[in-house]
Image (cartoon, coloured by chain):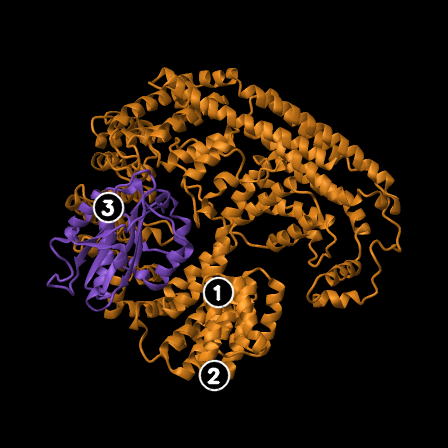
């Protein structure tokens, strides 16, 4: 590049670097005036334009540049960013392929072509490029690129079953053709082992692994050691592994739990590896092995003392497995070991979860265990406090149904509160960044009150739980576990705003939004005040969805990078990660929630309908991964009860079936309301109910689902008749396009020359006969009304009430969506739809009056709840926590005020929203 | 007692119990993938038998010449799994790999000057303060303004390639540099 030109181009790069895209465009124009054919400047201008969201202009320039078949590095790099911004990933591949073909000696172009294929997951082409590069440049690294591309192609779901072994065998052959053996570096060694494992050539793999270098690699590379363990297991070399594990445990003092598991597996191998019943000889041999293993574990336990739990826990696991294989000798062995374990490690927070798998005691064993625990309560020091927390948790775990009476649970709740308040003294001087040592007692209080609510159906227990947990949260500001419980309880109490506050204080971000946003966005439409213009939950959906954008722009780049750094061991995981985020269930559940709220928030016009139709259709056939984290929610409920998570879900969490049902509901409604041509013939699938869907729906949602099916079956034929033909639409689009500056889109321009007539052409066939509305439609609204009345007069929770209201409102909105096309008088006249219009009107009036009634009742409830009387009731309801402790009356009153105000706000907002929805669509 | 295994990209779906704790930062996807695509052997996880993640370490190898070393970028253990020597085990793996695979001269890490619990733990593992780095950390945003909170100690431990312990010094706490002087 000449210096003069360099001087002109530098300002463009500078502007692009500082995101001053407008000045970049100006700078480009300046150069292009003098040199209208400068490809680099055109590419840079296209980049600035795409960043300015001027997609069409950028597209045209990009096409011009691509037509020149660029090979210059600067042009290619700029175009890669342009095309990525335009989502034209396959064009990136084509661009580099074309460039590489012109300069087959250029190693960098080859690399770029390879990476371009990798980013889009085109393994076959990637493999071919890498093979070519290996021949050309004789570098083993390209050989491994080609090998691993073949492995990935074999892994790809789209590859035919029969082709897979062929590809793997090819990969194996290529490995032996390398200049250096695979153990040249751990990741190449990993590739070699992976191929042998997939081909089930375990003996060959073992030979590699037993080689001195192979052993050395596995010592320092966890990834290789992991696949080594896997191969040995598949090979059935459990006993050999067990022997090695024994040496590692005793001589090298290795305390990786995997070694203990290896030895356990080896011990029971002769019984566990066959489905045949074991002979007495085998049993005797295994019993002998058990004794030997017990000695190893006991020795480890003695050597480690309080330093490590492995030995003692392994002994417990050994006894448990002995029992499960019918080799049981002494009935009290497990209990005594558990007691021993507790005595040594009871002051560790994880003692509870360590012991859980071994505590299914009954009868006398349970009695002894319980009395052992009861004698270990002590609150003298922080260490004994932790021990007592474990005592209480473990006692709770083994409670039987007979012990779970309301009286006993109440007594427990009060005891937990007492020990919680006592325990606070150990944390008085801690900085506010620290957790209170007594936190878990407050969490137990929450559990006991939730259990009481489940036993009695009385809401007051949830209020007591909220009051205690708020108290604890104020004292332990960083405890996300307390917040998790509060989020659930506030939703049940109809105070979603408070749940949202706690969620935000947890500072959930980045990839966590995928796994945790379900806490506030599951069926968020039922809390949303979108009809009033409050877009809180819609924004939460948008924010939580940012991570999916990051995933699609960033992750593929790292797959390419892992090839470049030869970290093959990471690539399969990166691909899985990308796929799990890209096809995340939560992602599309949030999309559906967003649509539900948008429909309530915005006018039902073509822009909304067409856009959402296209987007929902796009996700309809995804195979989803459920990444939602429910495990993070603490659970200390007795083993005979459902978990805290299950108990406090307002409704069954929406799953793949729920998503499928709601996608069908909305795609159907949008398709009918839209003038867009149906490019994918989905209709048959859209009306088909699947059991998996029904199982996922609440009772009210089931009614709603049936209602939407009946509605679209009834109205569908009229839509099909009235919908303008595609040619007319294209003509319309072309016409409006002509008015805009710039070039018309090609497809539109071509269609505009067709024989389309304007607008509502007269059709040949008669309009479909007008039918009465199916009975199910008015009945749905009646049913929801009776559900509402029943819930109002009963003791159901606010969340149930709001679910009914939201479902009825949604049905009303879908009705509006399905009938909006038939509103204009001209349509009614032209197609003689007078009678149909009358049916619509009757139904609308009926539904409106039901919604209005619900609105009035809700508004009244809202008023009642936030009065001094309502608060008093709350405080009285929480009297149990005041009786038992030093809880301040004012504190409970404060929580009462917050909760009742939040509920009032929700009730009133939703009541107003209902009225608004009715008004907007009447 | 825990499973020591490699950190995987998909662990990002599982690490909530660790990362919701205030002391652990959750970074963007590219942070984790950068480390995994370059130094996967310096990243590992401790896992409980029930599959819960207990803690993890993320590290890298960097520097030139005599300064070539292993660096601990993040070391974290979930609150419920503390006091089990997990950090010690993960550090010893990272040191072993820095020594044997990367042939580094030392391992280093940064720690808030106020974090006395961590500092004494690292001292117990053979680390010593090499220098104090001014304003290395942001404020915790909890209304405190102590300098100590924002300053970091750069702590180091020599590996077998540095038998004469040239990478450490005795009075490191008095040796102060600004954040601009370190990478």
Instruction: Quickly name the residue at label 3.
Output: A310
Instruction: Quickly name the residue at label 1.
Output: A16
Residue at x-position 41% and y-position 73%: A145
Which image quarter: residue A321? Answer: top left
Q: Nearer the viewer, residue A237 or A671?
A: A671
Indicate which label's residue lies in the foreground, 2 or 3.
Answer: 2
Q: Position of residue A600 (x, y in %)?
A: 64, 39
The tint chain A carries is orange
Instruction: Quickly name the residue at label 2.
Output: A104
Q: Chain of mark 3?
A: A
User: Is residue A160 visible to us here?
Assistant: no
Assign a secondary structure to mark 3: helix
Indicate which label's residue lies in the foreground, 1 or 3.
Answer: 1
Q: Nearer the viewer, residue A446 or A67?
A: A67
Q: Are the residues tagged 2 and 3 within 8 Å (C-beta)?
A: no
Q: Chain of mark 2?
A: A
Label 2 or label 3, whichever comes before in sequence order: 2
User: Is residue A575 visible to us here?
Assistant: yes
Describe residue B102's horizontal placement relative to residue B20 as left or right.
Answer: left
Label 1 or label 2, whichever comes before in sequence order: 1
In whole angstroms, how far apart are the C-alphas of marks 2 and 3?
A: 59 Å
Label 1 or label 3, whichever comes before in sequence order: 1
Q: Same subunit under labels 1 and 3?
A: yes
Indicate whether A739 appears above or below A772: below
Indicate whether A394 appears above or below A880: below
- Quarter of the picture holding the C terminus of chain A: top right
Q: Are the residues tagged 1 and 3 within 8 Å (C-beta)?
A: no
The tint chain B carries is purple
Q: Chain of mark 1?
A: A
Q: Are the residues tagged 1 and 2 within 8 Å (C-beta)?
A: no
């Amino acid at each position: 590049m000449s210096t003069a030109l360099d001087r002109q181009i530098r300002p463009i790069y500078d502007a692009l670097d500082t995101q001053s895209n407008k000045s970049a465009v100006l700078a480009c124009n300046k150069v292009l005036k003098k040199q209208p054919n400068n490809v680099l400047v055109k590419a840079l201008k296209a980049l600035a334009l795409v960043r300015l969201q001027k997609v069409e202009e950028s597209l045209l320039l990009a096409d011009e540049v691509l037509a020149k078949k660029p090979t210059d590095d600067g042009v290619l790099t700029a175009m890669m960013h342009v095309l990525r911004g335009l989502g034209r990933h396959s064009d990136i591949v084509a661009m580099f392929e074309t460039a590489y073909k012109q300069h087959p000696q250029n190693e960098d172009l080859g690399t770029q072509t390879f990476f371009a294929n990798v980013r889009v997951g085109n393994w076959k082409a990637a493999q071919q490029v890498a093979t070519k590069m290996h021949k050309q440049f004789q570098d083993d690294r390209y050989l491994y690129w080609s090998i691993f591309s073949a492995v990935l192609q074999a892994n790809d779901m789209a590859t035919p079953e029969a082709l897979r072994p062929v590809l793997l065998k090819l990969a194996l052959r290529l490995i032996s053709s390398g200049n250096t053996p695979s153990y040249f570096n751990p990741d190449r060694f990993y590739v070699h082992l992976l191929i042998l494992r997939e081909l089930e050539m375990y003996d060959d793999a073992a030979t590699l692994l037993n080689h001195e270098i192979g052993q050395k690699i596995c010592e320092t590379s966890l990834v290789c050691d992991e696949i080594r363990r896997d191969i040995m297991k598949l090979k059935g070399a459990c006993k050999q592994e067990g022997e090695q594990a024994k040496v590692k445990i005793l001589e090298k003092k290795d305390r990786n739990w995997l070694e203990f598991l290896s030895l356990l597996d080896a011990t029971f191998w002769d019984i566990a590896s066959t489905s045949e019943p074991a002979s007495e000889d085998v049993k005797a041999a295994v019993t002998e092995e058990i004794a030997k293993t017990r000695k190893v574990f006991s020795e480890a336990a003695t050597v480690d003392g309080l330093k490590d739990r492995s030995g003692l826990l392994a002994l417990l696991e050994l006894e448990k497995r002995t029992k499960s294989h019918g080799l049981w000798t002494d009935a009290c062995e497990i209990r005594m070991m558990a007691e021993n374990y507790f005595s040594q490690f009871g002051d560790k927070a994880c003692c509870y979860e360590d012991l859980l798998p071994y505590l299914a005691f009954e009868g006398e064993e349970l009695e002894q265990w319980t009395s052992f625990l009861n004698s270990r309560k002590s609150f003298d020091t922080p260490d004994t406090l932790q021990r007592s927390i474990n005592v209480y948790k473990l006692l709770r775990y083994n409670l039987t149904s007979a012990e779970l009476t309301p009286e006993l649970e109440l007594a427990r709740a009060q005891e937990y509160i007492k020990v919680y308040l006592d325990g606070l003294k150990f944390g008085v001087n801690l900085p506010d960044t620290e957790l209170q040592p007594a936190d878990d007692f407050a969490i137990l209080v929450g559990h006991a009150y939730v259990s009481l609510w489940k036993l009695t159906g009385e809401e007051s227990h949830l209020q007591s739980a909220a009051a205690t947990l708020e108290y604890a949260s104020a004292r332990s500001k960083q405890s996300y576990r307390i917040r998790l419980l509060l989020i659930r309880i506030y939703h049940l109490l109809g105070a979603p705003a408070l749940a949202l506050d706690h969620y935000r204080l947890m500072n959930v971000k980045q990839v966590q939004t995928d796994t945790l946003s379900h806490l506030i966005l599951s069926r968020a439409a039922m809390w949303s005040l979108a009809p009033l213009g409050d877009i809180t939950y819609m924004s939460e959906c948008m924010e939580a969805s940012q991570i999916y954008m990051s995933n699609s722009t960033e992750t593929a780049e790292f797959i390419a990078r892992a090839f470049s750094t030869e970290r093959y061991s990471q690539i399969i995981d990166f691909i899985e990660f990308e796929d799990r985020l890209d096809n995340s269930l939560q992602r599309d559940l949030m999309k559906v929630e967003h649509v539900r709220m948008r429909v309530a928030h915005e006018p039902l016009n073509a822009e909304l309908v067409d856009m959402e139709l296209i987007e929902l259709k796009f996700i309809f056939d995804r195979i989803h991964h459920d990444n939602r984290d429910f495990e993070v929610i603490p659970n200390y409920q007795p083993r005979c009860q459902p978990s805290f998570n299950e108990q406090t879900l307002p409704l069954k969490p929406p799953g793949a079936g729920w998503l499928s049902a709601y996608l069908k509901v909305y795609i159907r409604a949008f398709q009918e309301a839209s003038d867009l041509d149906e490019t994918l013939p989905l209709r048959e699938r859209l009306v088909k109910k699947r059991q998996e869907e029904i199982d996922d729906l609440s009772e009210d949602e089931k009614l709603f689902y049936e209602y939407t099916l009946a509605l679209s079956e009834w109205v569908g034929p009229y839509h099909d008749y009235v919908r303008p033909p595609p040619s007319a639409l294209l003509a319309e689009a072309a016409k409006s396009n002509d008015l805009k500056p710039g070039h018309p889109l090609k497809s539109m321009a071509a269609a505009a020359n067709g024989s389309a007539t304007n607008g509502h052409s007269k059709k040949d066939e008669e309009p479909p006969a007008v039918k009465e509305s199916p009975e199910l439609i008015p009945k749905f609204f009646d049913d929801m009304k009776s559900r509402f009345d029943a819930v109002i007069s009963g003791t159901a929770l606010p969340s149930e009430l709001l679910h009914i209201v939201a479902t009825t409102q949604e049905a009303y909105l879908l009705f509006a969506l399905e009938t909006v096309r038939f509103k204009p008088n001209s349509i009614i006249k032209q197609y003689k739809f007078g009678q149909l219009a009358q049916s619509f009107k009757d139904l609308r009036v009926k539904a409106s009056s039901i919604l209005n009634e619900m609105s009035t009742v809700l508004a009244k409830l809202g008023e009642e709840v936030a009065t001094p009387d309502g608060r008093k009731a709350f405080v009285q309801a929480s009297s149990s926590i005041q009786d038992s402790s030093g809880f301040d009356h004012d504190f409970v009153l404060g929580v009462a005020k917050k909760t009742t105000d939040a509920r009032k706000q929700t009730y009133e907002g939703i009541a107003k929203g209902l009225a608004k929805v009715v008004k907007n669509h009447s | 007692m825990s499973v020591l295994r490699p950190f995987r990209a998909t662990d990002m779906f599982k690490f909530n119990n660790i990362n919701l704790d205030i002391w652990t930062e959750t970074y963007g996807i590219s942070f984790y993938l950068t480390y995994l695509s370059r130094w996967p052997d310096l990243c590992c996880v401790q896992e409980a038998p029930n599959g819960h993640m207990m803690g993890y370490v993320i590290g890298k190898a960097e520097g030139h010449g005599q300064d070539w070393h292993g660096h601990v970028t993040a070391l974290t253990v979930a609150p419920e799994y503390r006091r089990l020597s997990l950090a010690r085990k993960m550090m010893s793996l990272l040191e072993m790999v820095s020594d044997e695979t990367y042939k580094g001269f030392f391992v280093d890490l940064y720690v808030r000057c106020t974090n006395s619990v961590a500092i004494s733990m690292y001292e117990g593992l053979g680390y010593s303060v090499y220098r104090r780095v001014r304003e290395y950390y942001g404020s915790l945003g909890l209304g405190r303004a102590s300098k100590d909170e924002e300053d970091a100690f750069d702590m180091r431990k020599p590996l077998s390639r540095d038998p004469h312990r040239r990478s450490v010094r005795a009075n490191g706490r008095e040796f102060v540099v600004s954040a601009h002087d370190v990478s």
